[in-house]
Amino acid sequence: MKCKPMSCVWDITNKCNKEFDYTQTNSFSDELTTVQALNFIDMCANIGVLLINFFCIEASLRKDLYVLISHCRDKNILPNLIVGDVDITEDIAKKLKIAGICEIVVDINEFKLESAKENLKNLKDQEIYVSAITTVTKRNINILEKMKKILVSLGINFWQLRLNKIFLEDFEFYNSLVLEPENINDIMNFCYESAKEKKIKILPVGCTDRYVNREAEIKKQTSEKENFELDSCSAGIESFGILSNGDIVRCIFTKDKELVKGNIKEKSLEEVWNLLNTFCFEEDLLRKNIQKKYEACERCIKNCDSANVNAEETIYLPNMCCSYCLKPKNNLS
């Protein structure tokens, strides 16, 4: 294999206990059964996948989650969980620990800070490694410092800040919350100043991935690698996504059915990965065909597929949320 899949992000259910469902454009009635899901984990083990990130709004919405986590351990695959802003009781935390969960990323928002404290405490009491993730919007961008202090007080040492354009694009009601491109540099500055404090590692994710000196310093501070090199998202290179119905994609947040490469109900994972026009082939196209805005764009690895497809409806336009392109030409740093 030219590109070897090392990890997977698995959107294991499209069910949601909220009034809205972030997956409404990818809503499936034919989720993988337990047998099919276990078979998919076997496929991952057979081609050398080392890590599966389970993604769901609420852990209890997929009743066999603990079985799937345990099966990952049996196959020497590390199981992580990315979970929404829901209650994680002592009982759920214990079940996750017994099943063999490795790490849990908890969604933290400004409305449920108090319940988030309890969730994080329950997980830490089970000695489960916990980190946080927050979708930054106009509603919370001015209280990031307050949220940071709470996370530090709870002993959380890693926090991801993601750009809300990717994750809220489907909801017309939330359009007023979407950040302006200029806000990207506000996030970068917040991460940069926090990195100097060395109290918590804060990483901007999404479509801020660019060769900017300030961003490089932020990522260097959050990296555990001794020889740090700035890189971009590994989607389609060393990682892939699978939707709740078994569709294989580069990234689960790319809401474009034309980018689905196959379904594990019909083909093996290895067959899908090795199809002629699949991920690595697309990666070469991305490098050659992305429209460049500045000379420095030639050094850029690639755009964020999710950001561009969802916001611009193409992966080839320059990313207007790029932190480099937003800088004045005479003050690039």
Image: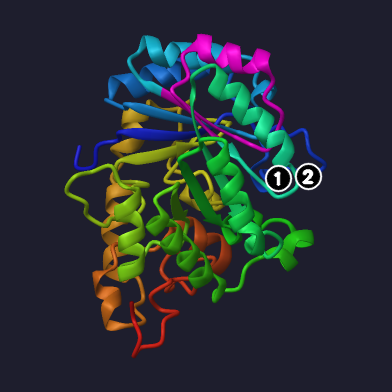
- Which of labels 1 and 2 is toward the front? 2
Quadrant position of residue 303: bottom left
> Where 285 falls versus 23 (above or below)?
below
Q: Amino acid at mark 1?
A: Gln
Residue at the spot 62% in from the left edge and 50% down from the top edge: 147
Is residue 89 within the magenta segment?
yes
Mark on residue 50? Answer: none
Coordinates of residue 33 in the picture (x, y in percent): 59, 17
SS at badge 2: loop
Q: Which residues are magenta?
A: 79-105
| Mark 2 neighbour density, 10 Å: few (under 14) some (14–19) many (20 or more) | few
Q: Are marks 1 and 2 in contact (CB under 8 Å)?
A: yes
> Where 52 falls versus 148 (above or below)?
above
SS at badge 1: helix
Q: Kindly identify which residue carries mark 1.
A: 24
Q: Kindly identify which residue carries mark 2.
A: 20
Coordinates of residue 153 in the picture (x, y in percent): 57, 40
Q: Quadrant of the C terminus?
A: bottom left
Is residue 232 within the magenta segment?
no
